[in-house]
Amino acid sequence: MGESASTTARTPTFRSGAPLERLLRAGLKLRHLQLLVALDDERKLQQAAAALNISQPAASKMLGDIETIVGMPLFVRLARGIEPNIYGEALIRRARAMLAELNQAGEEIAALRAGEGGSVAVGAVMAPAVEALVEAIESVRARLPRVEISAQVETSDVLSEALLASRLDFVIARIPVMADPGPFDYREIGPEDVALVVRASHPLAALKAVTPKDLDHRDWVMQPRGSLLRRALEAMLRRHGVAPPQRVVNTGSFLMTLVMTARTDAIAPMAIPVADLMMEAGNFRRLPLTERLEVEPFGLIRARGRQLSPAAEVLYRAVEARLLGIVGS
């Protein structure tokens, strides 16, 4: 499947320019960082206090202490709760990174005590990446039998935000179109080839070659307008004077796509690795297009300046080897 159009990523900085180390020297504590993250998650002081198992007055005083240390308000007080301003967002993002590093360190120490292991959190856009990721995980488990791996499959904009918030170690995705590429370390893999999948009894399935003209006035099931894959398909049709699909079931669900393709004459655009998995079921066909269909390149993305843990580095290299066709990992 493809992914949705990207949104703008904000990267605010402190007006004073004070580095986080200076704030730590001024009295910013680990508990303060935990409160900032809890406030961002809950958006209500009472609920954030409960998450940290402290009273609301204690949380309110702690927030006041934080804002005194930073030298400016970090949250906007609203009738329904609170939300971070641009300075709060900047500090919260760094707080999440620090807490994630500390949590990762604790998990690695525990894993090393028990034997080879560690923890890794990785994200991937479904189409180009999942198969390579599964193969890489299998190889890494042979080397690190106790490694704990968390995998999130989402669109590039969601994954990039999670990466910057330190919820993911690295992602296999695209840098969102409107995002600042500065915070990312990007290793391009290549474009994503797309296939058109139909059920075996589809009227087009028996053709030896399918042209863009053959796709006119057909039923489709695909992601909503604006997704990368859909834009690529519409661009190909336009080049040949074919109107964009009109009879479309819009869905981001692979299960819905699978059922619609199996039970109707809908055509489903999807990445070739996903299409190949469907071919194994024996009830589907890839239309033999006369023109190559692909979407923009994707790559391996890390947060610039953030070092991967040993376990994450091993998985990163294993994924890189498979995606780039390098022998061995």
Image (cartoon, helix red, strand yellow):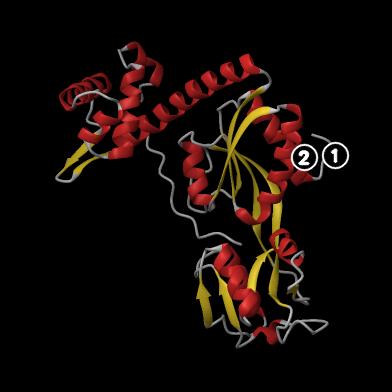
- Which residue is found at the position 52% from the left and 46% from the top? 159
- Which residue is found at the position 71% from the left and 52% from the top? 190
- Which residue is found at the position 47% from the left and 27% from the top? 100
Q: Is residue 317 visible?
A: yes
Amino acid type at circle 1 is Val
Q: Earlier in the sequence, mark 2 or mark 1?
A: 2
Please, what secondary structure does the residue beneath circle 2 have?
A: helix
- Which residue is found at the position 30% from the left and 12% from the top? 26
Query: How many labels, in total?
Result: 2
| Residue 327, numbered circle | 1
Indicate the position of residue 118 as horizontal and vertical percent values.
61, 25
Amino acid type at circle 2 is Ala
Q: Which residue is mark 2?
A: 321
**Do the CB atoms of the residues marked 2 and 1 lie less than 8 Å apart?**
yes
Q: Is residue 327 left or right of residue 212?
A: right
Label 1 CA crowd tier, 10 Å (few <14, some 14–19, many 20+):
few
